[in-house]
Image: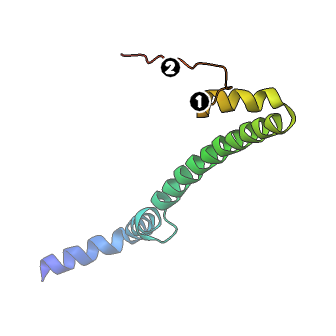
Amino acid sequence: MSKLGSVWNFLGRHKYVITIVAFGILIVFLDDNSLVRRMGYSREINSLREEIVKYRADYDESTRRLNELKTNPDAMEKVAREKYMMKKPDEDIYVFEDNP
């Protein structure tokens, strides 16, 4: 009975500390809105924002190139020659490959 009494005595003297520690553990680790999850969500939000910036830059570049292709016939000819290997009837094409 003395062990139970000493445990009860310990709990009685430190009840506020035990309550604060239990509350801290609940807030930091166990809650649905815990600090650990919030930090993970914050990292995910930051990475998604970086992706948004990257995709906006890609969109702006693609829009610029599309406008250039619509307005400049020389740009369209350049794309046709470089990407699709098209040529005029009286031309010869030579393709050089780089071997590493």
Q: Which residue is mark 1?
A: 85
Measured along the vertical axis of the image, is residue 99 above or below residue 13?
above
Q: Residue furthest right?
A: 71
Report the side of 20 relative to 65 (left or right).
left
Report the side of 88 relative to 37 (left or right).
right
Q: Which residue is mark 2?
A: 95
Residue drawn at x 70%, y 39% as measured from the top left: 57
Asked whether the residues under the numbered discs 1 and 2 touch, taking CB atoms below 8 Å apart as contact, a structural biologist would say yes
Residue 67 picture location, percent across and down: 82, 39
Which one is in front, 47 or 97? 97
Tell me how far mark 1 sits from mark 2, CA to CA.
9 Å
Residue drawn at x 26%, y 78% as measured from the top left: 8
Q: How is the image coloured?
A: rainbow
Q: Residues within 10 Å of mark 1 (few under 14, many from 20)?
A: few
Residue 6 picture location, percent across and down: 20, 74
Residue at disc 1, secondary structure: loop
Residue drawn at x 59%, y 51% as measured from the top left: 48
- The C terminus lies in which quarter of the figure? top left
Report the side of 50 relative to 3 (left or right).
right
- The N terminus lies in which quarter of the figure? bottom left
Which one is in front, 82 or 21? 82
Query: Please, what is the three-letter code of the amino acid marked with disc 2?
Result: Val
Q: Residue furthest bottom?
A: 1
Residue at disc 2, secondary structure: loop
Residue drawn at x 42%, y 16% as measured from the top left: 98
